[in-house]
Amino acid sequence: MSISSPLRHSASGRSAASLPGEVADAPRVLVKRSLDDRLTLAGAVVGSLALVWLLYERVLPFSGAVGFTFCWYFAFVGFFTGLTAMAHPRPIVIDRLAQAVIAGAAAAVGFALLATVFFTFARGWRPLTELSFYTKDMTGVAPTDPVSKGGVLHAIVGSGIELGIAVVVALPLGIGTAVYMSEVGGRFARVVRTVVEAMTALPDLLAGLFVYTTLLVGLGLQRSGLAAAIALSITMLPIIARSAELALRVVPGGLREAGVALGSTRWRTVWRIVLPTAAPGLATALILAFARAAGETAPVLIVSGASSFLNLNPVSNPMNSLPLFIYDGFRSGQPRYIERGFGAACLLLMIVLLVFIVLRLLARGRVGKSR
């Protein structure tokens, strides 16, 4: 038996035998499925499904699609593990079992997401087809009026103004905090990190109550979009700071050392090298914070209040938003108002998806230019 050398492999990746009669080494393909593997998978699916149907539906006094799905999945894992163990050694059995568990978890998450989106659009597609839904507010519109009357223009504009102010406040503070924790460090940075982690688990209702007692009760300000934006910025700040810190820590330390070696100052290296390199991660941090703040209802309800008219002034009068409009629609109990609420939820989903796509494209383009 001869020991093959890496120098005897051809450029195409296949091993070439240099001596007469020597068998070329071939890499083992781990992801390729044989006919026996496919039949094992199919047998486990069919066998577990038949067994669970017989016991769950015919023998035991159980019913319901959710319980049936859970029982079928556990039965499938058992069947699949047993059938695999009949033809493969223990390492392969453990590997296939791990694949089945991970694939099942991913499928459950994906199904929950798709079911939520499909259910929302199935209930709210009709208001989206009305032009007035985007161009009018709810002034003078009763909850029992058809969806062709009134719209959510005031909620769209209110959400845009509040989220815009919140991003302007929270983004520089969050990234600055992340730079301090990641690039400066020290004993006080540990205290800041602890506070940021504690604020991440802070209930959004407390942020609204804090702004209410500080600005509205303490300073005498009135309910407005500005107060709601400040409450939203409090919820966004720890998410941006924590996620941005993780993105900055992923940047290789060799880039920082190279910048300093070329004569750049520490902060110029951070500004010109570290931050552009971590741009995709910073965009992800902003997306996570934006998605959370875009769906907040409690802070807006406490410090801003609902309104049925369009308000472009963030420092005066109540200002509505899409989450608050959805809340009011479901609280009304009127079918047509609830349908408007589903339409606003569909619109909110599309706005968050659009912001996600735009930020990812901008971050990717920024990285390409920096290189």
Image (cartoon, grey):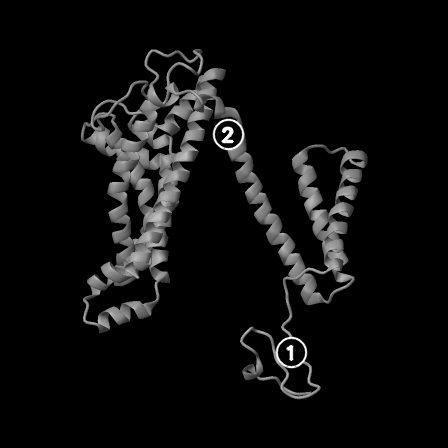
Q: CA distance from mark 1 to mark 2?
A: 55 Å
* Image quarter of residue 317: top left
Quadrant in the picture for the N terminus: bottom right
Question: With 53 as the anchor, is 266 left or right in this view?
Answer: left
- Report whether residue 158 is seen: yes
Q: Residue at x 25, y 23 (%)?
A: 311
Where disc 2 sits, the SS reads helix
Instruction: Give amino acid for label 2.
Output: Thr
Mark 1, residues whose alpha carbon is within 10 Å: few (<14), some, or many (≥20)? Answer: some
Q: Nearer the viewer, mark 1 or mark 2?
A: 1
Q: Toward which corner of the image does residue 37 lie, by quadrant?
A: bottom right
Amino acid identity at mark 1:
Asp
Residue at 24% in and 69% down: 259
**Above or below 328: residue 296:** below
Q: Is residue 239 above or below residue 98?
A: above
Front residue (pair 142, 351): 351
Residue 128: image x %, image y %? 44, 24
Label 1 or label 2, whichever comes before in sequence order = 1
Q: Look at mark 2 in the image and give the residue it sits on.
A: 120
In the rendering, at what x and y percent does residue 39 appear?
76, 54
Q: Which residue is mark 1?
A: 25
Q: Quadrant of residue 369?
A: bottom left
- Lateral position of residue 70 relative to residue 161, left or right: right
Query: Residue at left 32%, top 70%?
Result: 254
Q: Secondary structure at mark 1?
A: loop
Q: Which quadrant of the figure contains the C terminus?
A: bottom left
Tell whether label 2 touches label 1 (CB within 8 Å).
no
Nearest the eye: 55 or 43: 43
